[in-house]
Image: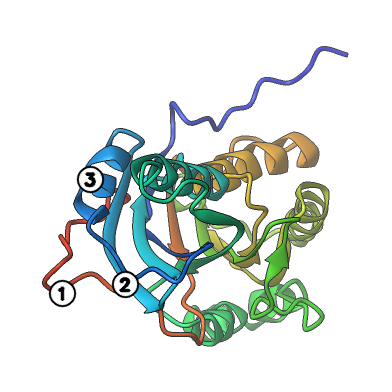
Amino acid sequence: MTPLTPIYTADNCTFCAPLEWGLSVFWRTLTSDSSWFADLQNATEADDLRILGHRFAKPGVSQFTVSTKPGTAPVFLVQRVKGRLQYLVRQTIPKALRANYGLRSFGRVTRETTENYVANQLDHHSMADERVQAMLGRYQIVDDDVDLSQPRQTSQGRYWYNLHLVLVHRDRWAEVREEVIRKLRDMVLRVCKQKGYALSRGGLLTDHMHLALGCPLEVSTRGVASGGCSRLLEQSGLRPRHETDVSVWGLRGNVRGVRPGGSSQRPGPSLGR
């Protein structure tokens, strides 16, 4: 069987994705010297990373706010910031950084608010036909066994990479056939399982869907969105269904992160906007 060519790719999709991250790295010595900060900002611009802020949470623990483009995988962010920082201080502090790190996606809305919003989509978009409203209610996704407040782990780090993804039907086509809605719901669940996405909530409506999910560190937000669209289409056997404009937001957790600003920092616009 000839492999299918993805319809949704990085080349034909556009994204609305204000993406910011909180990164914590750990020094081997209890330093509070940040004289390298401006050089690190300049160096990481070449990687399409914008460091918006830095502080020492305590001596030996650096916390950064970083803005990225949709095509940047979080693991690349960690590798480049740590690698370039180590290079800058190599003369004064050889092997300056420990291997471990912490990474968290930032957003303007809390995780709890987003999950509640996605779970209550039918209240926001009530159908005039009660039969359609009742049918859609049977295919909403709420998985209380998925706790997006808990970190995922690699051999060296802990991370929270949670997204709110919105996919809109092409031309806002309103799909009211129950067999199609059921097929889409089943495909969403199957794709998330295959790709390792932790799907907490899914709001399926007649002309769009909302998903709140945790993602693997190696996949960019663009990969989550465009790959998910193509996989859904491939597995469901349906015609192209979603627009190539995709909205993605990071979810804010309950811990306080580093924010731009301060005398030693250079705020800037998010590269993901």
Q: Is residue 108 visible?
A: no
Please name the amino acid that badge 1 sits on.
Gly
Residues packed near mark 1 inside 10 Å, few (<14), some (14 to 19) or many (20 plus): few
- Residue of label 2: 55
The residue shown at (29%, 74%) is: 259
The answer to whether the residue labelled 1 contacts the one labelled 3, judged by CB atoms less than 8 Å apart, is: no
Label 2 – label 3 distance at C-alpha: 15 Å
Question: Residue 84 vs residue 269: left or right?
Answer: right
Report the residue marked by disc 1. Answer: 262
- The tag on residue 183 is none
Residue type beneath disc 3:
Asp
Q: Which is closer to the viewer, label 1 or label 3? A: 3
Q: CA distance from mark 1 to mark 3?
A: 17 Å
On residue 39, the disc is: 3
Counting from the top left corner in percent of width and height, residue 55 is at 31, 72
- Tell me the kind of residue under disc 2: Arg
Instruction: Classify 270 as above or below 56.
Output: above
